[in-house]
Image (tube, grey):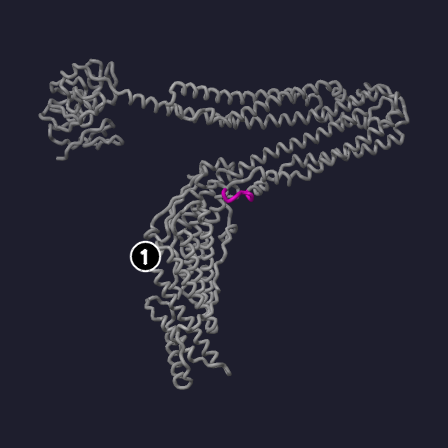
Amino acid sequence: MARSMKSVPLKGTTELDFVKLLKSHIKSAGSNEEDANNALATLTKSRNIGVLVPPDRTEVGLNMLQRYYDQFCSMEKRFPITDTNEIRVSFCWKDSFGKGVFGSKKSISSSGYEKAAVLYNTAAFMTQIATGIRSNDDASMQTATKYFQQAAGIFEFLRDNAVSMVGQVSTNDLSAEFLSFLVALCQAQAQECIWIKAYSSGKMKPKVLSQVTAALAEMYETAHAKADTQRTVTAVLKDDFNWLPDILVKIEHYKSLSHYYLGKELKRVRDSPGAECKYGEEIARYQLADSFLKYKTSMELLPNNIKTELKSELNVAIKDNNLIYHEPIPDTKTLSSPEKTILAKPTAFDATKTLSKEPKDLFGSITPLAVASALEFFKQKKTELVSVEVARLREANDTLNGVLASLNLPAALEETRSGELPASLWEKALKLQNQGGIEYVARFITDLPEMLDRNKQLLDESIRLLREEREQDEKLRNQYKQKWNRTSSDQLTKQLTEDQTKYSSLLQRSREADAKVKTQFEQTLDYMRILSLPKAEIEGKLPTAQNTDATKSAEAQQLRELMKEVDSVKVQRSRIEEKLQANSSPDTIKAKFLSEMTAEGTVNAPAVTETVLNEMFGDARTDLGETFLKQEKVLEQIQTVHCKFSQLSSGNNEVRDEFLKKLAQAYDAFETLVNHLREGQKFYGDLTEILLTHQSKVNDFVFARSTEKEDLLKDITSNATKTAGQPDAPSYHSNIPAASGSTTGSASSNSAPTQSTAAPSAPGQTPFAPNVQQPLYSNPTPMPSYNPYMPMTHQMPYGNPYAGGYPQPVYGGQMPPQHGQMPQGGGYPYPQQPMMPTAPYGQHNPYQPNMYNPYGQAPQAPGMNQWPAGYPQQQQPQQ
């Protein structure tokens, strides 16, 4: 029975090679080129075996088609293909029905068009699997029902979204009207499979079967009505595929079944004890069912036993009614319509989920162009944010250290004997020495100017290249005026020039920063030298101190507690700085941007970047702000307590305290200088890479413009030569006999030469090749002419068929060269040839070529060398 169902034919397409089509865009994505090529090659193979050549009508073949769809959707996110995008791939698809108006095809550069066509084929493939099921058992009919419902869901999705996916009108089978017909048809055929399953089981009550078949007839009526609204579709389905007549047959037959089963339900109820007998309605139902079966068709739709049972039930009911009950038989037109139960519904298609059973993202490691650009924007904003926050953090630390150093804390709180270095200062001295001391900072300060000059040279070279190209373009534009119609350099180099201005500003600020660092180093150099000494030598430079009880006071104890809070602030900031400068996972960031990419292949980089940066650094920035408030509060308390503490120790050790302050300030300056110099070194290294990339772009631009300039100059020169024409011939040329095929003296200088195809009139006269102008000063007396392919010394007294058929070289009045000699005072355009065997005039020489082939060599004669290339020869007639 499943053979009466309709399967949708597949759409045809043409072959594509994604590797070749997308090769130029792989590097722009910033991905591994080998991985991208392998993924695109696999995608091409999947398209060839799953789409270009339809696979077997099995679930394995369906999975191949679905796998290609999933892979293509993944590729689309990396390489968005639209009519307005720089990535263009033309997808050509044919109408699925292939006849009449459906025989046309459409090529559109749109990934949505490819997806819509592949989805259409997926649904069509499901219908072909369903109709290919021959068994009527429960499992087979359940499988067929599933595929018809899934196909209806896909067609329904395409009906609502095909136009928006493609962006324009495509093939007729993707129109909303035709897809509505396919939805109704697949849903009806799914309902039909449910009826077959119910009928085959033999367990369903007649009432249920009547409701299912009544709904089935109505569903086929809906499908026929939707097809009938589109006239061109109706013509194809009726004439070429015979679908509509078959649908009409099904409508009649399932109407018949619905009344037949309702009649059987009346009989079942009648046979129950105490039930009302309705012989008249039962007979009317059977008669109406029989009337629907009058529609003649060869389609195998209903089982033969149903038709036999119908006639049998009708005869029995009529006989019983005539003999016993004598109930009136109502008119069939007055019968109520059977109740309807729709069990088959389209399975909703979710475009966000994969179709294949084993989805594998071939393009997972490839970054889409839009995402790559957004990631560059994110990287720039992240660098700016981290730089600003780290600068704020270090500035706050410098302020904190400066205040403490000015108060000689914590050194003033340490109990020391006269001439002994406080432990906190010796700890700082050790840190300075372990980091390389003065020599380490001096080496940095010496290297930075060299790195600055290197970057300046790169930038200056790029600026020079653009300036020279622009000046050359302006010069040629002024020379050729409107003929120089290419785009001006100023318009094309706007972005490059803005980048150069930005880089120049960066270098200038860097130069100023280097100068400040050097000045700060020189101001604290003397005390850094002291900290670089051994402990004993440092203590030898300390001023003498008097013993005091201030370090044992309550104020000293309060200051020690406050210094612990200062240490906790510094530790917290150290952790915040580590978090700010920690490397985030690039895969996590890329996945976030991929998830935010729209269906059109775009990413709102500013919005996504702000969200990601808040997630990454929001807590750290909040904690940093809290340390600022805490520092302000602690410093206020320290200054208040220190005022009381300083009164206790006032006048005792002022000189010593000042010396210790200078040492502490020198160490703080060392720490600041090291941080700044390391950042400067990293900055110049990163800038060098940026400037090298910029210079590469400039070189590519200049080379392309140079090639464009040469081509434009050639065009201008060529046009000027064509416009200039040729000079008029002197008057005395008219006294010279004109050679056959040459122009006459009265012809205009711009006229085309008259062609001659006349054969020589007598032996010895040189035949001229057509379409070739002869030398102007040819001798009117017939004589052998010089032939560069055959020396004069070997010419025969009769006519040489190779002579005079091409322009002769001009030798400035000198005699033509003899065999083996080079000409003097003139060009020698063709290589000298070996001797050629000749035949009497009028006879064909089988060893001479009939027509010279400029891309090959003439046939080889026995015992002779192959004839080398030369000027095309005149066609000789075959004897």
Dot 1 corresponds to which residue? 240
Could you say where residue 407 lies in the image, as x and y percent from the top left?
81, 25
Q: Do we see residue 722 in this rendering?
A: yes
Q: Quadrant of residue 41?
A: top left
Residue 394 picture location, percent across and down: 70, 29
- Residue 100 in magenta stretch: no
Q: Please, which residue is most extreme toward the bottom here?
A: 324
- Quarter of the image with the N terminus is bottom left
Q: Residue furthest left?
A: 762
What residue span does the magenta drawing correspond to? Answer: 594-600
The amino acid on which the numbered mark 1 sits, given as a three-letter code, is Asp
- Please state if 545 lies on the left or on the right of 587 as rendered: right
Above or below, comparing residue 811 to residue 633 in the picture: above
Depicted 717 relative to depicted 25: above or below = above
The residue nearer to you, when weighing 35 against 732, is 732
Asked if residue 64 shows in the view, the reply is no
Q: In the picture, which quadrant includes the C terminus?
A: top left
Residue that appears at 57% across and 41% down: 587
Q: Is residue 598 magenta?
A: yes
